[in-house]
Image (cartoon, rainbow, N blue to C red):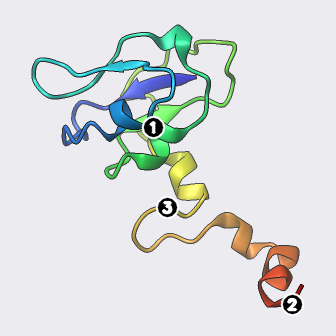
Amino acid sequence: MIEVLSESRCVSCNQCVSVCPTNVFDRGDDGIPVIARQDECQTCFMCELYCPVDALYVAPDSEQVIGITESEAEHLLGGYREKVGWGKGRTPIASHDYMYRLSQYARF
């Protein structure tokens, strides 16, 4: 479930607003999106994936709100995006797996 939108990191691109399939976000008056309907979040991670500045944290538990603050989530912001390798200079963690590397060379 979407937990944190970092106002200090946000660049007001509103990508999260655009990609959210359940319309969880509203555009704020100051240009920074707000989490308006947290209970509608389906934990699809699309907002976190598309955020170019890692300003979002989506908790993997879709049933429970953790209630974490921005300062508590500092080390978690953009974590999913980093793990899948989205962003300049990032490599998916799966690339370290032997079977993943083997599949890159297999001819089917």
Total labels: the figure holds 3
Mark 3: few, some, or many residues within 10 Å (few <14, many ≥20)?
some
- Read off the residue under disc 2: 107
Q: Quadrant of the N terminus?
A: top right
Q: Callout 3, which amino acid?
A: Trp
Verify CB contact (< 8 Å) between mark 3 and mark 1.
Answer: no
Indicate the quadrant where residue 61 lies: top right
Q: Callout 1, which amino acid?
A: Cys
Verify CB contact (< 8 Å) between mark 2 and mark 1.
Answer: no
Indicate the quadrant where residue 34 lies: top left
Mark 2: few, some, or many residues within 10 Å (few <14, many ≥20)?
few
Between 48 and 24, the residue placed more toward the observer is: 24
User: Real-space Cα distance between discs 2 and 1?
Assistant: 34 Å
Vertical side of 50 occupied by 101: above or below: below
Which residue is found at the position 50% from the left and 28% from the top? 21
User: Real-space Cα distance between discs 2 and 3?
Assistant: 26 Å
Of discs 2 and 1, which sits in the foreground? 2
User: Real-space Cα distance between discs 3 and 1?
Assistant: 12 Å
Q: Residue furthest left?
A: 30
State which tag comes first along the sequence, 2 or 1: 1
In the rendered structure, find residue 47 and report the number of the disc placed on it. Answer: 1
Residue 70: x and y in percent read 37, 27
Q: Secondary structure at mark 1?
A: helix
Verify CB contact (< 8 Å) between mark 2 and mark 3.
Answer: no
Between 47 and 70, the residue placed more toward the observer is: 47
Which residue is found at the position 48% from the left and 34% from the top? 57
- Read off the residue under disc 3: 86
Mark 1: few, some, or many residues within 10 Å (few <14, many ≥20)?
many
Residue 92: x and y in percent read 62, 67
State which tag comes first along the sequence, 2 or 3: 3
Which residue is found at the position 42% from the left and 26% from the top? 4
Of discs 2 and 3, which sits in the foreground? 2
